[in-house]
Image (cartoon, grey):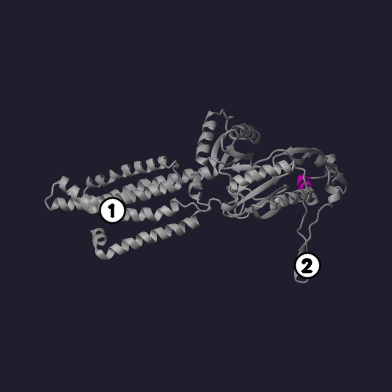
Amino acid sequence: MVIETQIYHPQHRYTALFGSVSLIVAGFIGSEFIAQGDRGEFVLVLEYPKRTSVAQNNIQSRKIEEFVSSKKEVVSTITTIGQTNEGGFFGSATGTPYKSEITVKLVSEDQRGKSSDIYGVLLKNEIMDKFPGVKVKSTPISILGTAEQAPIQLIVTGPSFDTVMVAANKLIQKVKKVEGTQEVKLTVEAGSPEVVVTTDRQKMAELGLDLQTVGATMQYAFNGNNDASFRQGEYEYDINILFDEFNRKSIEDVRALTFLSKYGKLVRLDQFAEVRESFGPSKLERFNRITSVTINSQLLGRPSGTVAAEIKEIIDGMTLPAGVSVIFGGNQQRQEESFGQLGFAFITSIILVYLIMVALYDNFVYPFVVLFSIPLAIIGALVALALSAQTLSLFTLLGIIMLIGLVAKNAILVVDFTNHLKERGMTTEEALLEATKERLRPSLMTTIAMVAGMMPVALATGPGADWKMDWLGR
C-alpha cells in the first residue's frame, strides 16, 4: 500500500518528523486564537424605577460610571443611556428610558486574579449596596461586543398572555432555586405605566367622528408626524409636528385632547372615551405565532448542561395550565442541535469507513475486524474524560470522531499486512503477531504526531483558555 511505502522509506522519516513539529506549532498558534473564554469584558445593565426619565437616568448613571471607573481593575468603560443591547444581534437595541448599560473592560486576568464573570458579580453587588434603588445585572459580553444571550433560556408558550405569565412566574421561582443560576428574569416586564383609552363607538359616531380620525390625531399629538421637511440649500431637515411637552405631561392632557368632527365642532376625548392610567407589559412576544414569554438566566460556577438537566426535571414535575408548554432556547437548543449533527457525523463516519474497507477487501466480513477496535477506543476516551473530570462537549465529540479515524487507520495497517502475510503461507496467529510488530512503528509515529499537535490546545492555560470547555455548555 502507498501508506506502507511512505512510512518506511528513509526519506520520509524527516517528513513525518516535520509533520509532527508542524502540528505542534499549529497547536500553539491555534491555542492563542481559540482561547477566547475570558474576554476581560462584561456589561452592567442598570435598571431604575419605571417612571425615571432619561435625564434622571443620565445623572445617576454618570455617578455609577465614575464609581466603576475608579476601580484599579477597570481599564475603560462605555455607557449607553436609555438603551440596552441585552442579547441583541448586529446592534439591535431596545430603547428604554429607565435602563442603561455600562460596558466594562478589565485588565488581563493575571493582574486581577478573578475571571470577568466573578468580578462582574462582585462589582454588581457593590453598586447595589452603594446606590440604593437601582437594579444591576452583570452579563458576559459576546463576540459582537454586546451583552451576550443568556446561556439558559426557557420559552413559555400558551393560548393567552395572562395564562403564560402565571405559568412563567411559577417556573421562575423554581429556576431561581437551582444552584448556579443568577440574574433570572423574564423578558417581558410587567408594571410599565401606560394610558389606556377605551372609546365608545356609538357616542363617537353621534359626535361625527370615526376611529381612524381619532387614532391618527392622537398619534400626531403625542408621537409626532415628520412627513413634512424643510430644505435650505443642499440640506434638508425633517419637521416633526406634535404637542408641546407642556401639553402632554399628564393624563389630564390626554383627556383634554380635542378633535374636529365632520360637523365642524370641537370634541374632547373624554366626551366619548374612558381615559385611565394602568400598568401593562413592556412588550408582547410571539414564538411560532403563539403568545410567549422567555425566562433568561445567567450561570456561575456550573455548566449549562447540568443546570439545564435539573431545570428539565423541574418542568417535568410541574402541572402546567392547559395549552401551556415550555421549551429550551438559546445555547441549550443550539447544543442539542450540534450534538445531534455530530452524532450523525459520528455514525456516518463509521458507515463510510466500513464501505471503503468493503471495497478494498472485497469482503463484507473482514471490515468488522477493524470496526471492533472502535468501541475500545470510545471506552478509552470516556475513561479519560472521567479521570480528568471533564464532561462530554463539542470539543470532546470532535476529538472522538478524530480518534475513530486514527484507530481505524491503525487497524487497517495491521489487518492489511496480516492478510499479505497469510497469502505468503503464515498462519493467522503468526501473521497477526508479525503484523503487529511491524506496524507498531508507523502507528506510533502517526498517533504521536496527532497527539502532540493537539496537546497545546488541550493544555493551554493562558488568558481565555477555558473557552474550549465553556463552548456549548461544556
| Residue 222 image offset from top left, x and y in percent | 79, 49
| Secondary structure state at the residue bearing disc 1 | helix
Other-residue count near label 2 (Cα within 10 Å), few / some / many at <14 / 14–19 / ≥20 = few
Along the horizontal axis of the image, is 293 left or right of 471?
Answer: right
Q: What mark, if any, has residue 443 been given in the picture?
A: 1
* On screen, residue 9 above or below 84: below
Which residue is labeled 2 in the image?
A: 231
Precedes in sequence: disc 1 or disc 2: 2
Q: Residue at x 22, y 45 (%)?
A: 365
Q: Quadrant of residue 339?
A: top left
State the extent of the magenta-drawn residues as a range. 210-215
The foreground one among 296 and 69 is 69
Task: Say whether residue 427 is visible.
Answer: yes
**Element under disc 2:** strand
Point out residue 232 in the picture as x, y percentages from the top left corner.
Answer: 79, 69
Q: Identify the residue at horizontal 14%, vertical 52% (top origin).
A: 423
Residue 465, x across and y down, in percent = 50, 51
